[in-house]
Image (spheres, grey):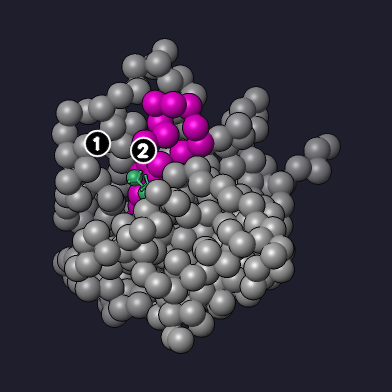
Amino acid sequence: MSSKISLTRYLVEKQRVQGHIPAQLRLLLEVVARACKGISHAVNKGALGGVLGSADSENVQGEVQKKLDIIANEVLIEANEWGGHLAAMASEEMEGIYVVPNRYPKGEYLLLFDPLDGSSNIDVNVSIGTIFSVLKKQGDDPNTIDPVNEADFLQKGCQQVAAGYCVYGPQTTLVLTVGDGVSMFTLDREQGSFVLTQEDVRIPEDTKEFAINMSNMRHWDEPVQRYINECLQGRDGERGKDFNMRWIASMVADVHRILSRGGIFMYPWDKREPHKPGKLRLMYEANPMAWLVEQAGGAASNGRERILDIQPKSLHERVSVILGSKNEVERVTRYHQA
Ligand code: AHG
Ligand code: MN
Ligand code: MN
């Protein structure tokens, strides 16, 4: 008998033995994982599957959609709409929310996702991923079917009931939290299932590695300039140690590295578009990643407040993101207060 623990067994035990998650949430997470498996297969086919390149359309953020952005979005919707566990979904690739059609039973959960993160890396065979966040529709009377609307989604990140991502890299790895730590599962392609490969993931509190798009340096605010300048000065400067830099340009892959060996990731506000709070989206990029990072002992801030405490005002709102090793994130936050 194999001692491998599949995602299915892990979730069943979370529900049954530990009572951590309700059955509907377990089903939801299984379905999301199945969808990610489907996306992983599409990603792997690459040019052979005709999935590369642009789709000649734009999403609500005015970004050109890649074929895989649309394919991944459809895979997630089709997998999740009929199971009875959801009330509605929201995605980077859809302007409004997607209410579960009336022909299907409805549940109390809300699912948000960035179906394909790191779109600029799709065609060059560099790691990309799917990010997801699960909320519970508030104030529901189980005996009435209240209409669901966008306002139901506008909950703070600290109200998430599950969050995770799947990274499509040299391995396909699903990373998950339901609020009691972070676990990682690697896709076993022969078995067709995700297998638990790391439990109780911890991010070291200190690091010598930062991730930021340096080409934007001249546009950053003073506190971020100060922090990076000090890192660049290395052992001769304020920090007294040499730093290394990594920037994959897929948040999923950069955060995965930080969960695996520590580091700090920043996509800060900058002066190019001063009215835009940042590039990354609060509800389906920053919030799930912030919760994973906090659950692994790290920190996540916008420079002024904890990301998980920000009250969202709209589905696609953007936010400045600083996350990873706790002492470094706290240092950057301190620089913002100085
Ligand atoms: P998406 O592909 O979902 O639009 O997200 C891309 C994001 C994020 O994954 C990454 O950290 C960042 O954009 C990269 O931005 P730059 O190209 O400006 O470095
Ligand atoms: Mn993204
Ligand atoms: Mn995306």
* Three-letter code for the amino acid on which mark 1 is drawn: Gln
Label 2 crowd bin: few (<14), some (14–19), many (20+), radius 10 Å: many
Q: Residue at x 16, y 34 (%)?
A: 57
Q: Which residue is mark 1?
A: 65
Q: Secondary structure at mark 2?
A: helix
* Up-down relation of residue 180 to residue 120 (above or below): below
Spatial separation of the CA atoms under disc 1 and disc 2:
8 Å
Label 1 crowd bin: few (<14), some (14–19), many (20+), radius 10 Å: some
**Residue furthest top as drawn:** 48
* Up-down relation of residue 95 to residue 269 (above or below): above
Q: Which span is picked out in magenta?
A: 103-128
Depth check, front residue: 273 or 201: 273
Q: Which residue is mark 2?
A: 119
Report if the beta carbon of the residue with label 2 is closer than 8 angstroms to ligand 1: yes
Instruction: Please provide percent x and percent y for residue 242.
Output: 69, 58
Q: Residue at x 46, y 86 (%)?
A: 338
User: Is there any visible trace of residue 199 in the rendered image?
Assistant: yes
